[in-house]
Image (cartoon, rainbow, N blue to C red):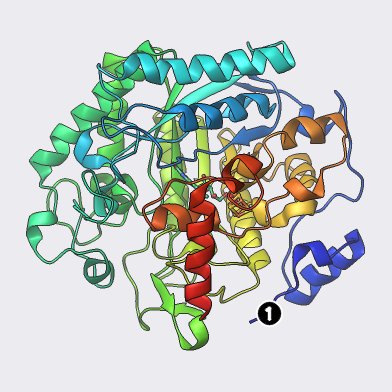
Amino acid sequence: MNYPKINSLKTLDAFQSRLDELEIQIPLDAAMQSGDAAPLAQSCDWNGGTIGNRFAILPMEGWDGTTDGRPTDLTRRRWKHFGLSGAKLIWGGEAVAVRHDGRANPNQLVINADNLAEIEALRTLLVDTHREHFGQVDDLLVGLQLTHSGRFARPNDKKRLEPRVAYRHQVLDAKFGVDSDAAILSDDELDRLVDDFVAASKLAQQAGYAFVDVKHCHGYLGHELLSGYDRPGKYGGSFENRTRFLRSIVDGIRSEAAGLQIGTRISIFDFIPFEPGPEGLGRPSRTGEYRSAFGGDGTGVGYDLTEPSRLMQLLEELGIQLVCSTVGSPYYCPHIQRPAIFPPSDGYAPPEDPLVGVARQINATAMLKRAHPNLLFVGSGYTYLQDWLPNVGQAVVQQGLADFIGLGRMVLSYPELPADVIAGRTMPRKKICRTFSECTTGPRNGMISGCFPLDPFYKAMPERQQIMALKQQTRA
Ligand SMILES: Cc1cc2nc3c(=O)[nH]c(=O)nc-3n(C[C@H](O)[C@H](O)[C@H](O)COP(=O)(O)O)c2cc1C
Ligand code: SF4
């Protein structure tokens, strides 16, 4: 399926016509504003102070830590870029495991007493870089994303999954190597994991992070528990039980790390796992009713925000104001999670114009924001908009559809985007992420991540050649 590339939609009218053709709504401002009065430059008050503008950097790991969970120079380079971006909200930096068995790969960062100084140094590097470029840092909010990778854990060997799951799954078990109930985390094990999240949060506070993100997205453990409709026991079944993990961690943080703020990144809806069909085009792996999607409508390919909205209500009751909305999972429905024109090597050709995926995320987030105006929402999935990202971001913020524009892949190829947009500088076209997906293909094949096609630093690496060779093989 050939969809028009964004860089071929050279005028606002051409872009708008494409949206009309697709019959989707994406808010779009014709004129960009810059300087202190610009909508994207406005500060935002929250219950912990002030955040200096409306750009957020989404968490992005690089598969480049040491095997004992410490950052390397590559990790530090990425965090430095987050600091020089000009964004005033750093949502989590990257997924950091609360303990060894929860690592998504043997090079994921781990937070523990031994590594703490280096985890702290990442934050200070980011803050110092930000100060150097922008002067003010009292309006810069930096959090740390805490995770257990659950079904997608590979703590010891890049090639060996060691999944720990919330429940047996009709499609994912076969795809991700679960063949017995032994992989299911028992209630007692989850109780201990709650303690590990609380201990990790205490350490994050000691390291100076203003908030922790108790990660509930992308099919990792926290997110999977939300869809444990058929799981027996105290962590499954009812809404109360499925949110017990989150509530218990929040309770623990409140008593053990008083003053530490809490946020959560949530897949606000999910789809059934997709697979390549004829000619590699993505299609749902099953037809019929699908029960395992939190925020799903039962079809596997639609959403119903009744439960996610209830979860937002719960966050308000728990005194959590910061929410980062994302959707689905990069492992089983990447086209909804990170819309891209080129699929990663383990993916499938996009079954819809990626703009449809962008619109879906923007509109679902807006629905939750409308229903819960006191929560502060960071939206995700904007990178595919490319040249039109600023015009959409400004309109989203102006219209109050989200409070912050979260940047993922775009910041790997073009870290200075927020500062450039706010200053009214022209975006250099050669830095704009064109969603080649090489930053996902690398790690899927045991390599580090980075923007291999556009960032000269990664372009010069041998991994770039390996990825090119992989692409040739896939095409052959
Ligand atoms: C290389 C890479 C690493 C990522 N790592 C994380 C992560 O550690 N934690 C997380 O919540 N999301 C992670 N994501 C997802 C992004 O935060 C974001 O949701 C996604 O890329 C869509 O936003 P975008 O369209 O701006 O790229 C990662 C994405 C990429 C491409
Ligand atoms: S490799 Fe670079 S251009 Fe490709 S999706 Fe990632 S950030 Fe974008």
Q: Name the residue: 54% across, 32% down.
A: 78
Q: Name the residue: 72% across, 11% down.
A: 135
Q: Is mark 1 within 8 Å of ligand 2?
A: no
- Of residues 347 and 50, which is closer to you in this image? 347
Q: Is residue 70 above or below residue 180?
A: above
Q: Name the residue: 67% across, 36% down.
A: 415
Q: Name the residue: 45% across, 84% down.
A: 277
> Residue 284, located in which quarter of the rendered image?
bottom left
x, y percent for residue 350: 57, 73
Q: Is residue 313 above or below residue 19?
A: above
Residue identifier under label 1:
2
- Of residues 346 and 167, which is closer to you in this image? 346
The residue under label 1 is which amino acid type?
Asn
Identify the element where label 1 is drawn.
loop
Q: Quadrant of the N terminus?
A: bottom right
> Residue 265, located in which quarter of the rendered image?
top left
> Residue 66, located in which quarter of the rendered image?
top left
x, y percent for residue 271: 43, 66
277 lies left or right of 359:
left
x, y percent for residue 156: 21, 44
x, y percent for residue 198: 26, 24
389 lies left or right of 438:
right
Residue 210 visible in the picture: no
- Of residues 315 and 437, which is closer to you in this image? 437
Q: How many marks?
A: 1
